[in-house]
Image (cartoon, coloured by chain):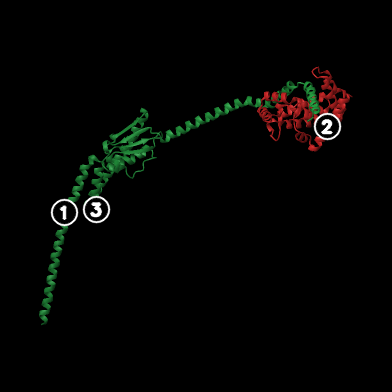
Amino acid sequence: MTEFEADVEKRLDAAIEHAVPDVLPEILARCDEETIAEITPIYAEKKRRPWAKRAVSLAAAFALVVAMAFGFSRYQAAYAVENVVTLGEGENAVELALNRRDEVIGVKSGAGADEAVEGLSLKGLGITEAAEILAEAMGERGMMSDPSGVTVEGKDGEKMAELQALVTSAVTEAVAKTVENAANAATEAVDALTEGDVAGALDKAGEAVNEAIGGAGELVGEALEGAGEAVSGAGDIIEDTAAGAGGIVSAVTDGIGGFLKDIGDWFGKKE
Amino acid sequence: MPAAALPEVENKDAMEEKIARMAAGDKNALAELYNEAKKPVFGFALSILKNTEDAEDVLQETFIRVWRGAAGYVPRGKPMAWLLTVTRNLALSRLRERARVADIPEETWQLFYVESPAVTHEDRLVLQAAMTALSESERQVVTLHALTGLKHAEIAEIMGLPLSTVLSKYSRARGKLESILKEGSI
């Protein structure tokens, strides 16, 4: 660039520099206007947004709380142990854990009651049904002959009393059923004995003994007595049978001897 | 090197940084960019429009457009070139509008430097010579070279002309100005 060119450009630059108007305030004002124009609707939305957001948040929180309460309630009703009913005592005791709906959700047995509980499917059953089944099973094994062996634990005294009555009733029914079964078996044994059915009598006597051992405490002696009689009767019958058999053998022997003698005689005459 | 080269304007990274800040809504960055670039923008607009009022409008509009477009600015070359391209488009648009309406008397643009006390007599002569004796494209080449510090190749790109054309126009403009100023015919 020549000196002339540099001088011209310098003067041109100086002339323009002093001529440039200051329009920055106008530019900034227009930018502000545009910003406000652009932002206003956003502000308008924002005015609603915090409210809407808060409402949505509250609704979501409320829904969550309700859902959690509902879930907790369902869980409590289904899985939380509300009461524990115990049948029997000591090692023969069986504990039934109940939920809020009085359904069995857990079964715990002492060492002596394992056999009675084994094979029973009590979970999910109502307490009445479960108590009947359990009392019957325990009664058959001589572990439950008295409804007084029922205890209930829980938080609500009223509910505990209700369960106590319910279970005691169910157990009483089950025990009565066991006693009735024992009595019936003993009767059948005696009937069989009078009919001379030794084997049947023995079977019935055995059943009666079993039933009697089970739960009919006061019938135990009677059943044993009946069974004893059945055994004794069976002995007599066996004795009589043996005697009869001896007579038959003797008669057969005699018959065979006579037969042989006749044959001998026939051959003698012929010679 | 151009006598009126602007170190700030040539600082590509600094300008890009300002544009980035503008994209983020920083008005201070807009003010800083305005102060750095107002002279070349105004000068270039004036060289096209030869009217201070229109040039002032274009100056204002250019920075508004830059403010709006800052977020979409893609660095491809010098930011000043982008700024001047915006200026040129706006000025040409204004020229077309003016052609549709009516021609503004040439005296209008002359008022500004007459009224400015900071401008020396020689400065006024140079400016007046540039505005009256040079053709439109010559005036633009000279103004851009004097005010922006851009190279001829960059000026060629802004004006959409071949480099050789820009060089010849610059050379011709220098000759005309030299002749006029030596003769003192203005």
Q: Secondary structure at mark 2?
A: helix
Estimate how packed mark 3 is, as few (under 14), some (14 to 19) or many (20 or more) residues with alpha carbons within 10 Å: some
Q: What label does residue A119 carry, if any? A: none
The residue labelled by disc 3 is: A200
The reply to whether residue B186 is in sight is no
Indicate left or right for B95 with A28 as reference: right
**Mark count:** 3
Q: Amino acid at mark 3?
A: Gly
Tell me the number on the disc at residue A236: 1
Q: Amino acid at mark 1?
A: Asp
Letter of the chain that mark 3 sits on in the rendering: A
Mark 2 belongs to which amino acid?
Glu
Residue drawn at the location 45% of the way across and 32% of the way down = A73
| Disc assigned to residue B138 | 2
Q: Nearer the viewer, residue A43 or A213?
A: A43
- Kind of element beneath mark 1: helix
Pointer 1 with pointer 3, Cβ within 8 A: no
Do the residues under discs 3 and 2 have CB atoms within 8 angstroms? no
Q: CA distance from mark 3 to mark 2?
A: 138 Å
Residue beneath the point at 12% across and 79% down: A267
Chain containing the residue with disc 2:
B
The x, y position of residue B168, in whole percent, is 82, 35
User: Which residue is located at x 53 percent, y 29 percent?
Assistant: A61
Tell me: residue B73, above or below residue A227.
above
Q: Which chain is red?
A: B
Provide the letter of the chain coloured green. Answer: A
In this view, the residue in front, A92 or B88, is: B88
